[in-house]
Amino acid sequence: MDAAQIDRVRRFDRTVTERVGVLHDHYLGRGRPVGEARLLWEIGEHGQDVRTLREAAGSLLAPLDEDQRARLAAATAEVERLLTAATVTLDPVDPDHPDAAHCLRACFPELRERFDTGFGPARSLLPDAGELRPPLGLFLVARLHGEPVGCAGLKLPPGAPAEIRRMWVSPGVRGLGLGRRFLAELEARAARHGRDLLRLDTNRALGAARSLYRSYGFREVPAFNGEPYAHHWFEKTVTARPGRDG
C-alpha cells in the first residue's frame, strides 16, 4: 500500500479535525479535548497495540483498488486545500507590526532572486509606513494558524486613485487563492473609501501575478509611476461605496 496515500489521508483527517473545532480543550462540553477522548475510544476497554492504532488510516484504504485509492487521495487533497484556504485570515495591522516585517523580510530576498536586475528596497518606490496607515492607507497580513503567510498594502492618497503595494504570498500557501482574496479585500476597502480606480504595478518576471491581475479584471495601462522595477502597470475601475471601513 502506498505510504504517501496513507499519509495524505492522515493529513486530511488532521485538517478536518482542526477546522470543525474539535481541537478545543472542552469539545462539546466534555472534560477533555477530543483527541484524548478519541484515543480512549480507539483503545477500548481491553486495550490496543500502538502499531494497530497507527494502521488505522491504512485500513481505510485497504478495501479500495489502486484507481479508487488515487481518486480518494485526489479528493482528500482538494478538500484539505480548500479547508486550509478557509482557515487563513486577513487582518489589518500596523505596517511596523512584527508580522508585517516578517513578510517583507521574506519577500525581498525572493524578489532579488527572481528579478533579472536583482532588487534593492532603497531603489524601489516602496511606500513608507505612514502611507500605509489610516487615513492614508492600510496594511493587511494573512495568517494561517496564527503565523504570517502573506501581506498586502493599500495606499489611499487624497484626490488620487488607490494603489496596491507590497503584495506577497508565501510560497508554502500559494495555490490557495490568497492572492485573489487580497485583491478582493483591498478593492472592497478602496471602494468604501470612495475610490473608483485601483492601480498596481509588477515586474516582468512575475508572470503568475500578471495572469492573476488580468483574470481579476485589471487592464494593462501606460506607466503611471517611476517604479524602477516595474515593467507592467495595471488599473481596474471599481464602484465607490463610501462608508465605514472596519
Image: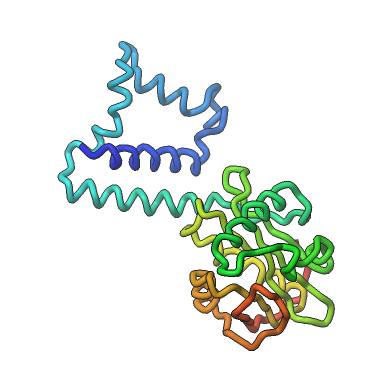
> Looking at the image, is 244 positioned above or below residue 176?
below
In the picture as drawn, the residue positioned furthest to the left comes out as: 65
Please indicate whether residue 28 sits to the left or right of residue 132 in the image: left
> Looking at the image, is 45 positioned above or below residue 89?
above
Q: Residue at x 71, y 69 (%)?
A: 189
The location of residue 62, given as percent across then percent down, is 19, 36
Quarter of the image that includes the N terminus? top left
Please indicate whether residue 20 sits to the left or right of residue 40 in the image: right
The location of residue 17, given as percent across then percent down, is 45, 38
User: How many badges with numbers are in the image?
Assistant: 0
Q: Residue at x 65, y 64 (%)?
A: 119
Q: Nearer the viewer, residue 38 or 122?
A: 122
Q: Nearer the viewer, residue 64 or 216?
A: 216
Please indicate whether residue 48 sits to the left or right of residue 99 in the image: left
The location of residue 82, given as percent across then percent down, is 45, 54
The location of residue 151, given as percent across then percent down, is 65, 58
Q: Nearer the viewer, residue 68 or 179?
A: 179
> Looking at the image, is 10 positioned above or below residue 151?
above
Colour convention of the picture: rainbow
Quarter of the image that includes the C terminus? bottom right
